[in-house]
Image: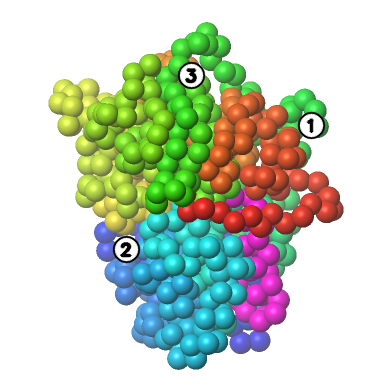
Amino acid sequence: MVPMIEFKDFTFQYREQKEPALRNINLTIHPGERILVTGASGSGKSTLACCINGLVPLLFAGKSSGTVAVMGENPAKAGVLKMSGIVRTVLQDVDSQFVGRTVAEDIAFILENEGMPQEEMTFRVKKMAEAVDVEPFLERVPAELSRGQKQRAAMAGALAEEAEVFLFDSPLSGLDPEARKRITGLIGDISRKKNSTVIIIEQHVEDVLSLGVDRMIIMEGGRIAAEGRPELLLNGSSGKNYGFCPPFCTVPFCQGNGEAAEGRYSEKRETMRHPPCGERAGQTALSVKNLYFSYEEGEPVLQHIHFDVGKGEMVSLIGKNGGGKSLIAEIICGFRQPSRGSVTFRGEDILNKTVRERGERIGLVTQSPAQMLFRRTVYGEVAAGLMARGMPKKEAEERIGRMLEICGLHPFAGQKISSLSFGQKKRVMIASVLIRNPEVIILDDPAAGLDIRHCAQIMEYLHKIRKKYGTAVVLITQDMHLALEHSDRAIVVSDGHLLADGATAKVLADEVIVRKACLACSWERQGSGREEVGGRERTAR
């Protein structure tokens, strides 16, 4: 059988980096194969993808040796335009992928380039939008969507037309559990019907494994550390050894009492369940009361949102994509003003405070690196907050070094941020906020792009500072395992309404809440016959 994709002794080093991102890759992928590529952050997964679709070296310059061929073509010589006709790609950073003014235009882009008749193109766009549940947003600007909605819109654009190869880099990142189920089902349908080659890059592997993956490739340090049938690799090694999140094979809570099972994001089992800081009970750090917000008058996307976060408490803000979670964070931090309601910090109304004034006390890690990273190097970005405060040089250097170590960034301190992987950029964002020691920290999609080891280190640090300093932590997440393992409470927001606020395990054990908020997890009972949740979303971020 003639290979669809073939690497031979291939090595690639980015111009800005001191070490190769890929080392001596020998890999053959056959037509119709379903391949899962996984491994730690910075292990070379996304670089491997960019060598297949031609983005290396067109957009990412560097030097290479060896050969890579896709259907006999050298992607570096064929160019991105020609390769896009062979390889459909969804990038990890979806914000950099959109080319249309609206979601509809973006989905139609590849169809227009191929000269599809208008009537057929309109039908195809609508069909794909329905398949990924973005039909209500076809006339919206992509920038107005939540990350999960953007992810689904990008998937619709990639799947709108047939191709020999579909390449997805972290396609499930930022999606609620119900959306992940829908997207994996869609990828599976495309693969079966068209016999296309499918390559999925993902650290959280359990949803991808449901596709019936033919082969699993584990990357480590730019090399292929292992490859083979998933069941053989997973039985023979721990995901922690390579940085990816292994399947959550045990039931995470028992019916009735909500007792947690074995943890995945903590280095030690005994640190998995962190008790609430009871000694600080009654001390409210952040309070949101009767919050309303509308993009357009008369069309509220947030209604009557209310919750408190106690000093030293860690809570999860969860719910379906587009339900309003990130929008709430933006209002708290001053990037948007509510239609009505109040936000208080230690009893003081902060709605009249500037973004900078709020930022001194409330730290926000956004979903997208492009929204937060502005300095040239890793060290410069992490150091910026301290330097602006005029901290003594010696003290600042000690704190910077400690934070770089905690976030696994010490080896990259002098490196250009532009040369980092998405996961490494995410760690820079987290480090740049944590180093300022804010009294409240809001992390939007904190596990996106992080491997299990670095996620564990950061979570353990968050628990230390909340216990030592009373720092309040809000995790906005679609990862129900992360929420269950680390948060005292879960605040559920769905379609702009507060759906629930209670102990995380009890909330996730409530079938009505789980169904309404699209929180169905991989631990749900098999064969339960639970119907698909296809509710329409308003455009809330």
Q: How crowded is mark 2: few (under 14 residues within 10 Å), some or many (20 or more)?
A: many
Residue placed at 69% from the left, 42% from the top? 514
Residue placed at 57% from the left, 81% from the top? 123
Nearer mark to the viewer, of 2 and 3:
3
| Element under disc 1 | loop
Residue 19 image offset from top left, x and y in percent: 34, 57
The reply to whether residue 357 is visible in this rendering is: yes
Helix, strand or loop: magenta stretch:
helix
Label 3 vs 1, first from the N-terminus: 1
Q: Is residue 10 above or below residue 31?
A: above
In this rendering, would 114 be left or right of 195?
left
In this rendering, would 185 be left or right of 18?
right
Return the mark for residue 310. Answer: 3
Within the image, what quadrant is residue 212 found in?
Answer: bottom right
Residue located beneath label 1 in the image: 254
What amino acid is found at the position of numbered circle 3 in the picture? Answer: Gly
Which quadrant of the rendered structure holds the N terminus? bottom right
Residue located beneath label 2 in the image: 14
Give whichever of 376, 480 is nearer the camera: 480
In this rendering, would 4 be left or right of 353?
right
Magenta segment: 176-202
Within the image, what quadrant is residue 502 found in?
Answer: top right
What amino acid is found at the position of numbered circle 1 in the picture? Answer: Cys
Within the image, what quadrant is residue 163 found in?
Answer: bottom right
Return the mark for residue 129. Answer: none
Label 2 vs 3, first from the N-terminus: 2
**Extreme residue toward the front, this view:** 298
Q: Cα distance, mark 2 to mark 3?
A: 46 Å
Residue placed at 53% from the left, 63% from the top? 136
Residue 342 image offset from top left, x and y in percent: 39, 28
| Element under disc 3 | strand
Q: Cα distance, mark 3 to mark 1?
A: 27 Å
